Amino acid sequence: KAGVTQTPRYLIKTRGQQVTLSCSPISGHRSVSWYQQTPGQGLQFLFEYFSETQRNKGNFPGRFSGRQFSNSRSEMNVSTLELGDSALYLCASSLEGPSGNTIYFGEGSWLTVV
Amino acid sequence: EDQVTQSPEALRLQEGESSSLNCSYTVSGLRGLFWYRQDPGKGPEFLFTLYSAGEEKEKERLKATLTKKESFLHITAPKPEDSATYLCAVQIYNFNKFYFGSGTKLNVKP
């Protein structure tokens, strides 16, 4: 069974530009969430989507946005990039269940802003 | 405020030297506590989920336990390939988002 797939794996952008990252969840998983990981802040929750609707949102500025498509694939966008946006962006998917939802991560997209 | 704290930040062990990693949490309405392993440059890999105090899960040299305030990840006779950063996360009811600790970086020397 294929895991969570994220593209691109590595990218370099210039300050002020925008970037779009893509995520394909595990087959059958309808919940997709995004996290930012930096050495100083650790793993921080960005947002979560389920059935094309944003259900939860973290404490990030409006420059960070996302969406989910009918096939559960998701994209996140960061506009007007800042140097501090350099991070590993992780996508995770989960299968909804009554006892709790284990989330499974992709390998991440490394974003460097110069 | 919901918080997850892991200790120690870093741990160096000799191969075969058993130890424990700690994850303490203060959250309202714990739905589940999760342990992940992360290798450099990779995404976190799921290890265990614990749902209630007293629960234990085992996998090879790893055993996770849960109390009402904290969780322990016990590593028995570790090998160099166990070197990684171990992350714990909590999920609270009514929210499908996870609060992660800052991790424990484990280094096992041969």
Image (cartoon, coloured by chain):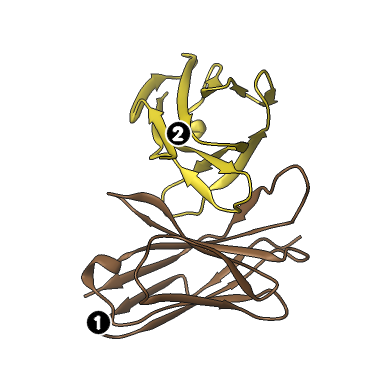
Q: Horizontal placement of A30 versus A63: left or right?
A: right
Q: Secondary structure at mark 1?
A: loop
* CA distance separating discs 2 and 1: 35 Å
Q: Chain of mark 1?
A: A
Residue B50 position within the rendered picture, expressed as x and y whole percent measured from the top left: 66, 31
Q: Which mark is residue A14?
A: 1
Residue B21 position within the rendered picture, expressed as x and y whole percent measured from the top left: 46, 23
Amino acid type at mark 1: Thr
Question: Which image quarter holds the N terminus of chain A?
Answer: bottom right
Please say if A8 is above or below B21.
Answer: below
Q: Chain of mark 2?
A: B
Q: Which mark is residue B83?
A: 2
Q: Are marks 2 and 1 on the same chain?
A: no
Label 1: few (<14), some or many (≥20) within 10 Å? some
Q: Residue at x 22, y 80 (%)?
A: A15
Q: Residue at x 54, y 20 (%)?
A: B74
Please say if B56 is above or below A43.
Answer: above
Question: Which image quarter holds the C terminus of chain A?
Answer: bottom left
Q: Secondary structure at mark 2?
A: loop
Tint applied to chain B in the drawing: yellow
Residue A57 position within the rendered picture, expressed as x and y whole percent measured from the top left: 49, 63
Farthest residue, direction bottom: A17
Depth check, front residue: A64 or A111: A64
Q: Residue at x 77, y 50 (%)?
A: A97
Labels 2, 1: front one = 1
Tint applied to chain A in the drawing: brown
Depth check, front residue: A96 or A74: A96
Please say if A31 is above or below B98.
Answer: below
